[in-house]
Image: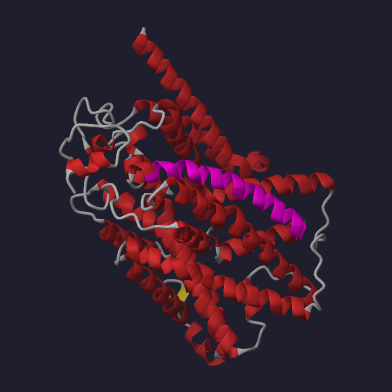
Amino acid sequence: MTAANLTKTGTTPASEPTPDPRLYNDDLAPATDRRWKVYDIFALWMSDVHNLGNYTFAAGLFVLGLSAWQVFTALLFGFVLIYFGMNLMGRIGQRTGVPFPVVARMSFGTFGANLPALIRAIIAIFWYGIQTYLASVAITLLVLTIDPGMKSWTEHSFLGLHALGWVCFVALWLAQALILTRGMETVRKFQDWCGPAIWVVMIALAVWILAAGHWNISLTTSPTHLSGGQQVREWFGATGLILSTYGTLMLNFCDFSRFAPDQKTVRRGNFWGLPINSTAFALLSVIVTAGSLRVFGEAITNPADLLARVHNTPVLVLGAVTFAVATMGVNIVANFVSPAYDLANIWPKRITFTIGGMISAVAALCVLPWKLYSSPTVVNYFLGGLGAFLGPLFGIMIVDYYLIRRGKIDVAQLFVAKPGAPYHYKRGVNPLAIGAFIPTAGIAAVIALVPVFAPAAPYSWFIGTTSSALLYLALSWRQREAVAA
């Protein structure tokens, strides 16, 4: 792609500078093939939402003491907020056509953008491995239920994982890597059908459990009694946690919206995929969990455990395949596309989207995710601490685009690294963005991790986003006044 192509996708007319090879390759360049329609974005959210983690999260809220309707309203409120946040970042991606690390150059600088890109990439790589491992555990359990003779494969381990676990994990790992090596168009086609696939199993589970419970499931009670004040705290806590969970993808949603032909497509896809589909999935998860409490006398929060009680081999096989597909969907959307672009941004001349994706996949395997997941220190402090940084990054980027620049971006200049270039700042780094990020990221991490602040921990993403946005805005105005004086 030439520099002339770059300027055509921008929002401000520009000269036609030659892209710097340290900042440019075809994968980072503005998208020209914009085939993503409303259904593609809707299916993207189905792929991201329909997974074991989100099912367990919604079911866990029910077990903690919220009724089905309280879980529904809390998550609906959260997903409405996420919907607006996704639209904000989605608009930037759709208008500029560039992925997240290039968008980050606007506020952090042409080389400073590697900071948010690396933070997002590291989180994604670790969670990619952990998500793959968790799905492989579910599939392992179903395989053992189908064929108890496979138990002999679990008697010896290598690097902390038994043979059957290795087979299931590597099979999922290879299938995901194969899809990513074929590019974003294959990603689009895959998630168009993998998202709806889990609905088939979930609806079947719901019908089965409702029938077993004689169609008498309470939506207003919970297995745990909470006072009115405790219910309010849990309700708002659920909203805060769902914001933190989706703060990762909210940050790099431009990786997908860049392929949409117009902003209306992005908004409509987000509407059907977030407030509508996501809350419906959460409600169905709670209904199934409430049904398990009535039928089995205990609230089963893992659908794989519930499926194992069906005692029907074809159903178990279908369930195992569906859970594998569902995990592949969420991993590709949330944990694979982002580091592929983020790593390409570090060395565009040598790392393409495909190579970045394979580096991510290999790294996710090498970190031995089953050992990571078994360590609360790693999951809670390392990944939790890094996750707290995402809110401040989002706040800075949104304020920079909408309030400081008023949506006026010279896209071609995002690929120029020389003194005087508008996004090169000081040696490629914007001191104001770094100055706003460091203290607010520290505050968010302390709130998320230090036990004394546990009551505020669910709101760490919101606190980090708001504080960074206000600080960056104040610093920018102060600099503008100093220049004017």
Q: Would you place residue 437 above or below residue 298 in this image? A: above
Indicate the colouring scheme.
secondary structure
What stretch of residues is rendered in magenta?
A: 66-94
The residue at the far top in this view is 485
Drawn side of residue 68 relative to residue 175, left or right: right
Q: How many marks?
A: 0
**Which quarter of the figure has residue 419?**
top left
Residue displayed at 24% across by 34% down: 413
Q: Nearer the viewer, residue 352 or 281?
A: 281
**Which quarter of the figure has residue 220?**
bottom right
User: Where is residue 55 drawn, in percent x and y?
Assistant: 62, 64
- In which quadrant of the rendered image does the C terminus lie? top left
The residue at the far bottom in this view is 149
Drawn side of residue 363 relative to residue 329, left or right: left
Q: Main secondary structure of the magenta part?
A: helix
User: Where is residue 39 drawn, in percent x and y?
Assistant: 47, 61
Is 67 magenta? The answer is: yes
The residue at the far left in this view is 18
Is 79 magenta? The answer is: yes
Q: Would you place residue 138 above or below residue 340 in this image? A: below
Q: Would you place residue 297 above or below residue 354 in this image? A: below
User: Where is residue 150 drawn, in percent x and y?
Assistant: 51, 89
Residue displayed at 42% across by 65% down: 368
Residue displayed at 59% across by 60% down: 277
Q: Nearer the viewer, residue 423 or 167?
A: 423
Drawn side of residue 139 relative to residue 6, left or right: right
Residue 72 seen in render: yes
**Which quarter of the figure has residue 56?**
bottom right
Residue 126 seen in render: no
User: Where is residue 37 drawn, in percent x and y?
Assistant: 42, 57
